[in-house]
Image: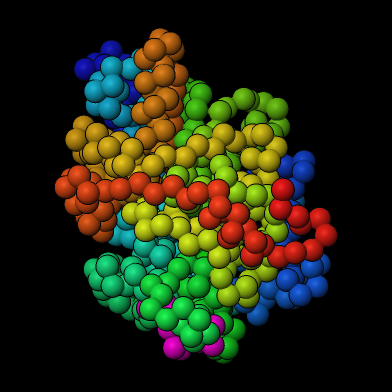
Amino acid sequence: MKSANENIPYKIFLSEDEMPTQYYNVRADMEKKPAPLLNPGTLKPITAEELEPIFCKELVKQELDTIHRHIDIPEEIREFYKMYRPSPLVRAYCLEEKLQTPAKIYYKFEGNNTSGSHKLNSAIAQAYYAKEQGLKGVTTETGAGQWGTALSMACAYFGLDCKVFMVKVSYEQKPFRREVMRTYGANVTPSPSETTEVGKKILAEHPGTTGSLGCAISEAVEEAVKSDGYRYVLGSVLSQVLLHQSIIGLETQSALRKYNIEPDIIIGCMGGGSNFGGLISPFMGENLRGEKNYEFIGVEPASCPSLTRGQYVYDFCDTGKVCPLAKMYTLGSGFIPSADHAGGLRYHGMSSIISELYDQGRIKPISYKQTEVFQAAEDFARCEGILPAPESSHAIRAAIDEALKCKETGEEKNIVFGLTGTGYFDMYAYQAFNDGKMTDYIPTDEEINEALKGVPQFPGNEIK
Ligand SMILES: *Cc1c(COP(=O)(O)O)cnc(C)c1O
């Protein structure tokens, strides 16, 4: 084995004392900041007062903070993190061997907690700030179920009530996810539902719909606004979520420094952009300050290609059009992605931070079809042991392809990728792949153009 003549262990662990005590806010190092959220009524930048009926006060502050580079992680959050962090940075020796590549591959594994993904990093922070504010509970949406599960765990820990609107198709297809959430005490409603005005409206317009993330968001927001002592929390897309997820990148940076490893390429999968943003943020900061020149690759599904085929305009974050407008690469809030198995990547837009960084040419986005992704997942599982989430497997695919390029050129690049979670609740997807029944769907330009017609029309916001 290669490991015999290298002194880098399979797993680079940090001690609890080496865990970050502050989050890193990449916006502070961006000369051109991401565009502000707009009030959809006035088209003016939204104020803290306007956001506070929807979101927790401290989270609003974080959302609007483009100045402070470091933000303290409260001790209560760090105590919780210690139950499953620092997460290991693993050297993929077996995968390197299998690929016969001179590249060195590392992955930051975020699947070591019951919710099975990185989403717990932000869920616990958001639950903490809600508790701090003296709230009774929070509402949210969940698609594939990872976010709802993470938030249920976090709310149970702080004794908060948790109402989850779960996209109906997942509610029916992933009963075990649902039951995990209920075990942690959450109240789970299939969306669209009759419990909200927006749910009733969507059901009247589209009877028999199996729901979408954008629609579940609308219901969760409505529920929070009309219930006393509740606020809405979101598991991705928002800048506050990328801030919390920066713990992934900060730990990765410390682990690499411990062994004097200089990464060349850093890769992550992109749904709303939170794990990718969190992983790359501290490294991007070095690039932004002119200290380094890392390459960043963001991977999305070909079925929901917001960065690779979307437009950079202000759009609604949700189907019900109740959230503030965000400037982002979007496919249109009415875009309904095909039933790709990587449920966590099926969002029509992209974090405004990631969108702006891409617009500045600092990120390279690529997309893969799901059969290519599952092939990589299988290759990875068979040598590295971990059964990866379909979402995470997008990053695996890209890491493998970069390592194969190194095989051709003989370059010994250091490739780091984010392994965001495990795939135990995705066995129907693996079954389809194993049975050779998985198909690929790529939206046509006409479909995307049609959905983009739903983008709000105002001067300066034209579709190109
Ligand atoms: C939700 C999820 C993602 C995608 O969400 P981002 O906000 O883009 O990070 C990726 N991997 C897993 C395992 C997820 O649960």
**Residue at 24% of width from left, 68% of height from top?**
176
| Residue 149 percent coordinates (x, y) | 36, 66
Work out whether residue 407 can be spotted. Answer: yes
Between 78 and 349, which is closer to the camera in this rendering?
349
**Residue at 80% of width from left, 73% of height from top?**
42
Work out whether residue 45 can be spotted. Answer: no
**Residue at 41% of width from left, 65% of height from top?**
143
In the rendered image, residue 68 lying in the magenta stretch gets the answer no
Q: Is residue 463 above or below residue 8?
A: below
The answer to which quarter of the image holds residue 158 is bottom left
**Residue at 35% of width from left, 46% of height from top?**
440
Between 411 and 308, which is closer to the camera in this rendering?
308
| Residue 297 percent coordinates (x, y) | 51, 34
**349 with respect to 139 (left or right):** right
| Residue 183 percent coordinates (x, y) | 27, 75
The residues colored magenta run 190-198
Between 237 and 318, which is closer to the camera in this rendering?
318
Q: Is residue 11 above or below residue 83?
A: above
Q: Residue lying at the far top in this picture: please name it.
A: 410
Q: Residue lying at the far front in this picture: please name it.
A: 446
Instruction: Say which quadrant the N terminus sits in.
Output: top left
In the rendered image, residue 196 lying in the magenta stretch gets the answer yes
The answer to which quarter of the image holds residue 119 is bottom left
**297 with respect to 108 (left or right):** right
The scheme the figure's colours follow is rainbow
**210 with respect to 4 (left or right):** right
Between 338 and 380, which is closer to the camera in this rendering?
338
| Residue 438 percent coordinates (x, y) | 26, 48
The number of numbered badges drawn on the structure is 0
